[in-house]
Protein backbone atom coordinates (compact mmCIF):
# COMPACT_ATOMS: atom_id res chain seq x y z
CA UNK A 1 0.00 0.00 0.00
CA UNK A 2 1.49 3.34 -1.07
CA UNK A 3 1.91 6.14 1.42
CA UNK A 4 -0.57 9.04 1.22
CA UNK A 5 0.73 12.17 -0.54
CA UNK A 6 2.33 14.87 1.58
CA UNK A 7 0.30 17.59 -0.19
CA UNK A 8 -3.23 17.11 -1.54
CA UNK A 9 -4.95 19.90 -3.47
CA UNK A 10 -8.58 19.50 -4.55
CA UNK A 11 -10.62 21.93 -6.68
CA UNK A 12 -8.54 24.89 -5.50
CA UNK A 13 -9.93 28.30 -6.43
CA UNK A 14 -8.56 31.81 -5.90
CA UNK A 15 -10.81 34.57 -7.24
CA UNK A 16 -10.31 38.32 -6.97
CA UNK A 17 -13.19 40.82 -7.20
CA UNK A 18 -13.10 43.53 -9.86
CA UNK A 19 -14.42 46.81 -8.43
CA UNK A 20 -15.23 49.99 -10.32
CA UNK A 21 -16.84 53.37 -9.79
CA UNK A 22 -16.96 55.77 -6.87
CA UNK A 23 -18.69 53.24 -4.63
CA UNK A 24 -16.27 50.44 -5.60
CA UNK A 25 -19.05 48.08 -6.57
CA UNK A 26 -18.02 44.62 -7.72
CA UNK A 27 -18.48 44.33 -11.46
CA UNK A 28 -16.70 41.05 -12.10
CA UNK A 29 -14.34 38.38 -10.82
CA UNK A 30 -10.81 37.47 -11.91
CA UNK A 31 -10.50 33.69 -11.67
CA UNK A 32 -6.74 33.46 -11.13
CA UNK A 33 -7.01 29.81 -10.02
CA UNK A 34 -10.14 27.89 -10.96
CA UNK A 35 -10.55 24.25 -9.96
CA UNK A 36 -6.95 23.07 -9.67
CA UNK A 37 -6.26 19.58 -8.24
CA UNK A 38 -3.00 17.68 -7.76
CA UNK A 39 -1.03 15.57 -5.26
CA UNK A 40 2.66 15.76 -4.35
CA UNK A 41 4.28 12.71 -2.77
CA UNK A 42 6.90 13.11 -0.06
CA UNK A 43 10.31 13.67 -1.62
CA UNK A 44 8.85 14.53 -5.04
CA UNK A 45 9.21 17.67 -7.13
CA UNK A 46 6.15 18.78 -9.09
CA UNK A 47 6.93 21.36 -11.74
CA UNK A 48 4.20 23.90 -12.53
CA UNK A 49 4.59 25.66 -15.87
CA UNK A 50 2.68 28.02 -18.12
CA UNK A 51 2.67 31.53 -19.56
CA UNK A 52 2.90 34.58 -17.34
CA UNK A 53 -0.49 35.32 -15.80
CA UNK A 54 -1.80 31.75 -16.01
CA UNK A 55 -2.12 31.43 -12.21
CA UNK A 56 1.07 29.57 -11.25
CA UNK A 57 2.20 31.91 -8.47
CA UNK A 58 -1.35 32.36 -7.21
CA UNK A 59 -1.62 28.57 -6.92
CA UNK A 60 1.56 28.41 -4.86
CA UNK A 61 0.43 31.18 -2.53
CA UNK A 62 -3.02 29.60 -2.11
CA UNK A 63 -1.49 26.20 -1.29
CA UNK A 64 0.48 27.79 1.56
CA UNK A 65 -2.52 29.96 2.53
CA UNK A 66 -0.50 33.13 2.00
CA UNK A 67 -3.63 33.98 0.03
CA UNK A 68 -6.91 32.58 1.33
CA UNK A 69 -8.52 30.28 -1.26
CA UNK A 70 -12.07 31.04 -2.29
CA UNK A 71 -12.80 27.37 -2.97
CA UNK A 72 -11.34 23.91 -2.62
CA UNK A 73 -9.26 22.10 -0.05
CA UNK A 74 -5.55 21.77 0.72
CA UNK A 75 -4.23 19.02 2.97
CA UNK A 76 -0.66 18.97 4.25
CA UNK A 77 0.60 15.85 6.04
CA UNK A 78 -3.03 14.81 6.53
CA UNK A 79 -4.18 18.13 8.04
CA UNK A 80 -6.86 20.18 6.25
CA UNK A 81 -5.32 23.67 6.31
CA UNK A 82 -8.71 25.33 5.87
CA UNK A 83 -10.03 23.78 9.09
CA UNK A 84 -7.05 24.60 11.32
CA UNK A 85 -7.28 27.30 13.97
CA UNK A 86 -4.92 30.24 13.64
CA UNK A 87 -2.55 28.82 16.27
CA UNK A 88 -2.54 25.36 14.66
CA UNK A 89 -1.95 26.85 11.21
CA UNK A 90 0.96 28.86 12.63
CA UNK A 91 2.55 25.67 13.97
CA UNK A 92 1.91 23.82 10.71
CA UNK A 93 3.62 26.58 8.74
CA UNK A 94 6.96 25.54 10.22
CA UNK A 95 6.75 22.53 7.90
CA UNK A 96 6.00 24.45 4.69
CA UNK A 97 7.91 27.47 3.41
CA UNK A 98 8.36 29.54 0.27
CA UNK A 99 11.27 30.73 -1.86
CA UNK A 100 10.18 33.97 -3.51
CA UNK A 101 10.78 35.06 -7.08
CA UNK A 102 12.78 38.23 -6.56
CA UNK A 103 15.82 38.08 -4.26
CA UNK A 104 15.93 41.88 -4.47
CA UNK A 105 12.39 42.49 -3.17
CA UNK A 106 12.01 39.59 -0.74
CA UNK A 107 14.81 40.55 1.65
CA UNK A 108 14.35 43.45 4.07
CA UNK A 109 17.19 45.91 3.34
CA UNK A 110 17.19 47.02 6.99
CA UNK A 111 17.82 43.52 8.32
CA UNK A 112 21.26 41.95 8.24
CA UNK A 113 21.56 38.60 6.49
CA UNK A 114 21.76 36.86 9.86
CA UNK A 115 18.66 38.71 11.04
CA UNK A 116 16.70 37.73 7.94
CA UNK A 117 17.57 34.04 8.33
CA UNK A 118 17.01 34.10 12.09
CA UNK A 119 13.60 35.78 11.84
CA UNK A 120 11.61 32.54 11.25
CA UNK A 121 13.38 30.98 14.25
CA UNK A 122 12.46 33.98 16.40
CA UNK A 123 8.83 33.94 15.25
CA UNK A 124 8.37 30.23 15.98
CA UNK A 125 10.48 30.29 19.16
CA UNK A 126 12.92 27.65 17.92
CA UNK A 127 15.90 27.10 20.24
CA UNK A 128 17.82 29.45 22.50
CA UNK A 129 19.50 32.63 21.20
CA UNK A 130 22.81 30.80 20.99
CA UNK A 131 21.27 27.88 19.13
CA UNK A 132 19.64 30.26 16.67
CA UNK A 133 22.97 31.92 15.89
CA UNK A 134 24.53 28.50 15.35
CA UNK A 135 21.64 27.57 13.07
CA UNK A 136 22.17 30.73 10.98
CA UNK A 137 25.84 29.86 10.50
CA UNK A 138 24.91 26.28 9.59
CA UNK A 139 22.36 27.44 7.00
CA UNK A 140 24.74 29.91 5.36
CA UNK A 141 27.32 27.16 5.01
CA UNK A 142 24.63 24.81 3.66
CA UNK A 143 23.81 27.17 0.76
CA UNK A 144 27.45 27.86 -0.05
CA UNK A 145 28.00 31.21 1.69
CA UNK A 146 30.55 32.24 4.31
CA UNK A 147 28.97 32.05 7.80
CA UNK A 148 30.78 35.30 8.57
CA UNK A 149 28.48 37.05 6.09
CA UNK A 150 25.64 37.08 8.63
CA UNK A 151 26.57 40.62 9.76
CA UNK A 152 26.40 42.03 6.23
CA UNK A 153 23.32 43.48 4.51
CA UNK A 154 21.49 42.38 1.33
CA UNK A 155 22.77 45.24 -0.83
CA UNK A 156 26.31 43.90 -0.38
CA UNK A 157 25.48 40.69 -2.27
CA UNK A 158 24.83 39.75 -5.90
CA UNK A 159 21.45 38.47 -7.08
CA UNK A 160 22.55 34.84 -6.97
CA UNK A 161 23.94 35.25 -3.45
CA UNK A 162 20.71 36.94 -2.32
CA UNK A 163 18.68 34.00 -3.64
CA UNK A 164 20.95 31.65 -1.66
CA UNK A 165 20.11 33.75 1.40
CA UNK A 166 16.40 33.42 0.55
CA UNK A 167 16.80 29.64 0.30
CA UNK A 168 18.59 29.57 3.67
CA UNK A 169 15.75 31.56 5.23
CA UNK A 170 13.16 29.16 3.79
CA UNK A 171 15.05 26.21 5.31
CA UNK A 172 15.48 27.78 8.75
CA UNK A 173 12.57 25.93 10.39
CA UNK A 174 13.48 22.57 8.73
CA UNK A 175 10.39 22.40 6.48
CA UNK A 176 9.23 19.27 4.69
CA UNK A 177 7.56 21.14 1.81
CA UNK A 178 8.88 24.16 -0.10
CA UNK A 179 7.09 26.20 -2.78
CA UNK A 180 9.71 27.70 -5.10
CA UNK A 181 7.99 30.56 -6.94
CA UNK A 182 10.07 31.14 -10.08
CA UNK A 183 13.29 31.18 -8.00
CA UNK A 184 15.57 31.71 -11.02
CA UNK A 185 13.59 34.04 -13.30
CA UNK A 186 15.12 37.24 -11.82
CA UNK A 187 18.68 35.92 -12.02
CA UNK A 188 21.35 36.11 -14.72
CA UNK A 189 21.34 33.16 -17.09
CA UNK A 190 24.91 32.33 -16.05
CA UNK A 191 23.93 31.52 -12.46
CA UNK A 192 20.48 29.95 -12.90
CA UNK A 193 21.94 26.46 -13.20
CA UNK A 194 23.90 26.97 -9.96
CA UNK A 195 20.75 27.76 -8.00
CA UNK A 196 18.78 24.87 -9.51
CA UNK A 197 21.63 22.45 -8.79
CA UNK A 198 21.80 23.76 -5.21
CA UNK A 199 18.06 23.13 -4.79
CA UNK A 200 18.41 19.59 -6.16
CA UNK A 201 21.30 18.91 -3.79
CA UNK A 202 19.32 20.24 -0.82
CA UNK A 203 16.35 18.09 -1.81
CA UNK A 204 18.51 14.96 -1.69
CA UNK A 205 20.34 15.92 1.52
CA UNK A 206 17.30 17.11 3.48
CA UNK A 207 14.51 15.01 1.95
CA UNK A 208 12.58 18.04 0.74
CA UNK A 209 9.38 18.09 -1.30
CA UNK A 210 9.06 20.89 -3.89
CA UNK A 211 6.37 22.66 -5.86
CA UNK A 212 8.68 24.20 -8.47
CA UNK A 213 6.99 27.06 -10.34
CA UNK A 214 8.74 28.28 -13.48
CA UNK A 215 8.39 29.12 -17.14
CA UNK A 216 11.91 27.99 -18.09
CA UNK A 217 11.00 24.56 -19.46
CA UNK A 218 14.59 23.32 -19.66
CA UNK A 219 15.09 23.99 -15.94
CA UNK A 220 11.72 22.39 -15.14
CA UNK A 221 12.79 19.21 -16.91
CA UNK A 222 16.10 19.22 -15.03
CA UNK A 223 14.40 19.74 -11.68
CA UNK A 224 11.06 17.92 -11.72
CA UNK A 225 9.75 14.39 -11.31
CA UNK A 226 6.31 15.31 -12.67
CA UNK A 227 5.07 18.38 -14.53
CA UNK A 228 1.68 20.12 -14.55
CA UNK A 229 0.87 22.60 -17.33
CA UNK A 230 -1.45 25.52 -16.50
CA UNK A 231 -3.47 27.71 -18.83
CA UNK A 232 -5.81 30.47 -17.71
CA UNK A 233 -6.20 29.22 -14.13
CA UNK A 234 -6.54 25.50 -14.86
CA UNK A 235 -4.28 22.49 -15.29
CA UNK A 236 -4.54 21.22 -18.87
CA UNK A 237 -1.97 18.42 -18.73
CA UNK A 238 -0.04 16.54 -16.04
CA UNK A 239 2.37 13.62 -16.39
CA UNK A 240 5.77 12.29 -15.49
CA UNK A 241 8.51 14.64 -16.64
CA UNK A 242 10.02 12.51 -19.42
CA UNK A 243 6.59 11.33 -20.56
CA UNK A 244 5.26 14.88 -20.89
CA UNK A 245 8.32 16.21 -22.72
CA UNK A 246 8.57 13.20 -25.05
CA UNK A 247 4.83 12.69 -25.67
CA UNK A 248 2.83 15.90 -25.10
CA UNK A 249 -0.90 15.42 -25.70
CA UNK A 250 -2.44 18.88 -25.27
CA UNK A 251 -2.07 21.43 -28.11
CA UNK A 252 -0.95 24.09 -25.63
CA UNK A 253 1.78 21.84 -24.21
CA UNK A 254 2.96 21.04 -27.74
CA UNK A 255 3.22 24.78 -28.48
CA UNK A 256 5.20 25.43 -25.30
CA UNK A 257 7.64 22.60 -25.95
CA UNK A 258 8.14 23.64 -29.57
CA UNK A 259 9.63 26.91 -28.30
CA UNK A 260 12.55 25.19 -26.50
CA UNK A 261 15.78 25.76 -28.47
CA UNK A 262 18.21 22.86 -28.83
CA UNK A 263 22.03 23.07 -28.69
CA UNK A 264 22.40 20.83 -31.77
CA UNK A 265 22.53 23.11 -34.86
CA UNK A 266 21.07 20.44 -37.16
CA UNK A 267 18.19 19.69 -34.79
CA UNK A 268 17.61 23.41 -34.24
CA UNK A 269 17.43 24.01 -37.99
CA UNK A 270 14.73 21.35 -38.28
CA UNK A 271 12.73 22.45 -35.23
CA UNK A 272 9.13 23.32 -36.14
CA UNK A 273 7.92 26.21 -34.03
CA UNK A 274 4.18 26.26 -33.23
CA UNK A 275 3.16 29.93 -33.04
CA UNK A 276 -0.13 30.48 -31.24
CA UNK A 277 -2.43 33.10 -32.74
CA UNK A 278 -4.31 35.73 -30.73
CA UNK A 279 -3.94 36.93 -27.17
CA UNK A 280 -4.54 35.12 -23.89
CA UNK A 281 -8.18 35.76 -22.89
CA UNK A 282 -8.94 37.69 -19.73
CA UNK A 283 -9.31 35.52 -16.59
CA UNK A 284 -12.21 37.82 -15.70
CA UNK A 285 -14.09 36.64 -18.80
CA UNK A 286 -12.77 33.24 -19.91
CA UNK A 287 -14.11 31.60 -23.08
CA UNK A 288 -16.91 29.07 -22.92
CA UNK A 289 -16.02 25.39 -23.07
CA UNK A 290 -12.28 24.82 -23.41
CA UNK A 291 -10.39 27.93 -22.35
CA UNK A 292 -7.67 27.31 -24.91
CA UNK A 293 -10.03 27.00 -27.88
CA UNK A 294 -9.68 30.65 -29.00
CA UNK A 295 -5.98 30.01 -29.76
CA UNK A 296 -6.09 26.30 -30.54
CA UNK A 297 -5.25 25.31 -34.14
CA UNK A 298 -7.44 22.16 -34.00
CA UNK A 299 -10.49 23.41 -32.05
CA UNK A 300 -13.93 22.15 -33.08
CA UNK A 301 -17.49 23.20 -32.26
CA UNK A 302 -17.52 20.79 -29.33
CA UNK A 303 -14.62 22.70 -27.76
CA UNK A 304 -16.82 25.81 -27.48
CA UNK A 305 -19.72 23.91 -25.95
CA UNK A 306 -18.18 21.48 -23.46
CA UNK A 307 -15.52 22.09 -20.84
CA UNK A 308 -13.01 19.21 -21.11
CA UNK A 309 -12.17 17.36 -17.90
CA UNK A 310 -8.75 15.97 -17.00
CA UNK A 311 -8.73 12.33 -18.08
CA UNK A 312 -5.94 9.80 -17.78
CA UNK A 313 -4.62 8.58 -21.14
CA UNK A 314 -1.37 7.15 -19.80
CA UNK A 315 -0.13 3.58 -19.79
CA UNK A 316 -0.57 1.34 -16.76
CA UNK A 317 1.51 2.66 -13.88
CA UNK A 318 2.33 5.88 -15.73
CA UNK A 319 -0.56 8.37 -15.37
CA UNK A 320 -0.80 11.04 -18.06
CA UNK A 321 -3.80 13.33 -17.57
CA UNK A 322 -4.96 15.78 -20.24
CA UNK A 323 -7.96 18.13 -20.54
CA UNK A 324 -8.66 18.02 -24.27
CA UNK A 325 -11.56 16.53 -26.23
CA UNK A 326 -9.26 15.67 -29.15
CA UNK A 327 -6.31 14.11 -27.30
Image (cartoon, grey):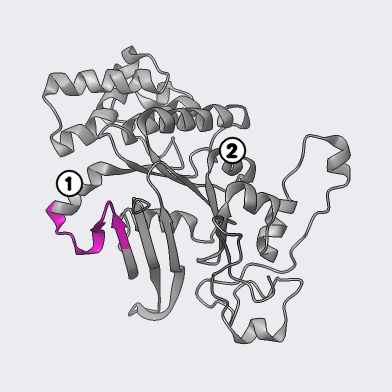
Q: Which residue is depicted at the point 77% across and 39% down?
A: 262
The answer to which of 263 and 245 lies nearer the viewer is 245
Q: Nearer the viewer, mark 1 or mark 2?
A: 2
Q: Which residue is depicted at the point 60% across and 61% down?
A: 314
The answer to which of 49 and 166 lies nearer the viewer is 49
Circle 2 packing at 10 Å, graded few (<14), some (14-19), many (20+), is some
Circle 1 packing at 10 Å, graded few (<14), some (14-19), many (20+), is few
Residue 228 horizontal/vertical position (percent):
54, 56
Q: Which mark is residue 91?
A: 1
Q: Is residue 263 left or right of residue 55?
A: right
Q: Is residue 78 magenta?
A: yes
Q: Quadrant of residue 140?
A: top left
Q: Is residue 282 left or right of residue 265?
A: left
Q: Is residue 69 visible?
A: no
Q: Which residue is depicted at the point 32% across and 66% down?
A: 73
Q: CA distance from mark 1 to mark 2?
A: 33 Å
Q: Is residue 265 magenta?
A: no
Q: Which residues are magenta?
A: 74-87
Residue 230 horizontal/vertical position (percent):
55, 61
Q: Which residue is depicted at the point 72% across and 58% down?
A: 255
Residue 302 horizontal/vertical position (percent):
67, 85
Q: Is residue 129 left or right of residue 266?
A: left
Dot 1 lies on which element? helix
Q: Earlier in the sequence, mark 1 or mark 2?
A: 1
Q: Is residue 136 visible?
A: yes
Q: Which residue is mark 2?
A: 222
Q: Is residue 46 left or right of residue 22?
A: right
Amino acid sequence: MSAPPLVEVRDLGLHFPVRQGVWRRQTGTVKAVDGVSFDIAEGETLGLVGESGCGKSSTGRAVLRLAKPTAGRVRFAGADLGRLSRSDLRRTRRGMQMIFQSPFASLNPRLSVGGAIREPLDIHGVGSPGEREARVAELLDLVGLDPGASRRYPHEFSGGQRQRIGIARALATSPRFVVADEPISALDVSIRAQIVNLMRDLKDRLGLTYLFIAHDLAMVRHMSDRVAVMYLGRIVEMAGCDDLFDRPLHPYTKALLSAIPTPDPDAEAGRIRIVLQGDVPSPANPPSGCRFRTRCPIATAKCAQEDPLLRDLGAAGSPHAVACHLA
